[in-house]
Amino acid sequence: MDRQTVHEYIKKKYKASPEYPWRSYPGYAVFRHEDNKKWFALTADVAGKTLGVPDTELVDVINLKVDDLFFRDMLIQEPGITPAYHMNKQHWVSVLLDGTVPGERVFELIDMSYLATASAKKKEKIRPAKEWIVPANPKYFDIVHAFDEKKEINWKQGAGIKKGDTVYMYVGAPVSAVLYKCRVTETDIPYNYRNERLNIKALMKIRLQKRYPEDRFTFDVLKSEYGIYAVRGPRGIPNSFSEALKR
């Protein structure tokens, strides 16, 4: 792992070329988003002693942004990752490019920094697939038998849900349990329906992937084991619940 490898990775994946804005520091290269012009990476050669690398005059590093402060505190415990050199140390880290940090880890952190600094529009477009709990009221739709004759149905599209996401269908009383795991195969299907209880502006298409017994993920289990106290609309799920659903 070295600076040239990093530059080639960024250019190939993000079509971003290095800029060298400082005459006094010809080894410092900045990479920006094309749309909002924000930096997402900076490579530099810095004095090793500033990063705690003994007996080394200069070391190559890449500075990357980390939005999650808790994750940032975890990162700087890893060998070769330190609070950022000459940047905001709360939100940026410096990663050694001398082989201390494995290449795949460096690429992973570059991708994270790119997403953290992207515009809102780009973040939505490139974000990884998410998992959601989506409520279904059996009083208005026979969701219990919805997948008996076909594996794919249309459903009200929730805000933030996109193609490729996973939705776990929570069926309300009297069932009060998660019954289905589905993959979102299409979104933004035009639809206009309104009554005193429902206002549907778009549909999504969901494909059944797995069924769960009615007594497995009940509302009581969601509360007591996973801290989920309400399912009134589409919502994300904690990691512990995600792992349980996949077993």
Image (cartoon, helix red, strand yellow):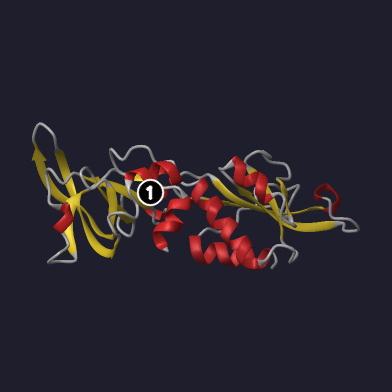
| Nearer-the-camera pick, 170 or 32 | 170
Q: Is residue 14 left or right of residue 90?
A: left
Instruction: Choose top left, top right, bottom left or bottom right for residue 56.
Output: bottom right
Q: Residues within 10 Å of mark 1 (few under 14, many from 20)?
A: some
Question: What is the x, y in percent for residue 242?
Answer: 43, 55
Numbered disc 1: secondary structure:
helix
Residue most extreme to the top: 196
In the rendered image, the vertical position of residue 230 relative to residue 124, given as above or below: above
In the rendered image, the vertical position of residue 112 relative to residue 83, given as above or below: below
**Location of mark 1 (residue):** 124
Q: Is residue 161 left or right of residue 14?
A: left
Question: What is the x, y in percent for residue 173?
Answer: 21, 42
Residue at the image point whose x is 60% and y is 46% from the top: 71
Q: Is residue 72 left or right of residue 138?
A: right
Q: Amino acid at mark 1?
A: Glu
Question: What is the x, y in percent for residue 83?
Answer: 72, 45
Question: What is the x, y in percent for residue 114?
Answer: 52, 52
The quadrant in which the N terminus is found is bottom right
Residue at the image point whose x is 32% and y is 48% from the top: 218
Residue most extreme to the front: 215
How many marks are shown on the rendered structure? Answer: 1
| Nearer-the-camera pick, 197 or 173 | 173
Residue at the image point whose x is 49% and y is 50% from the top: 115
In the rendered image, the vertical position of residue 56 relative to residue 156, given as above or below: below
The quadrant in which the C terminus is found is bottom left
Q: Is residue 57 left or right of residue 30?
A: right
| Nearer-the-camera pick, 20 or 235 | 235
Instruction: Choose top left, top right, bottom left or bottom right for residue 174.
Output: top left
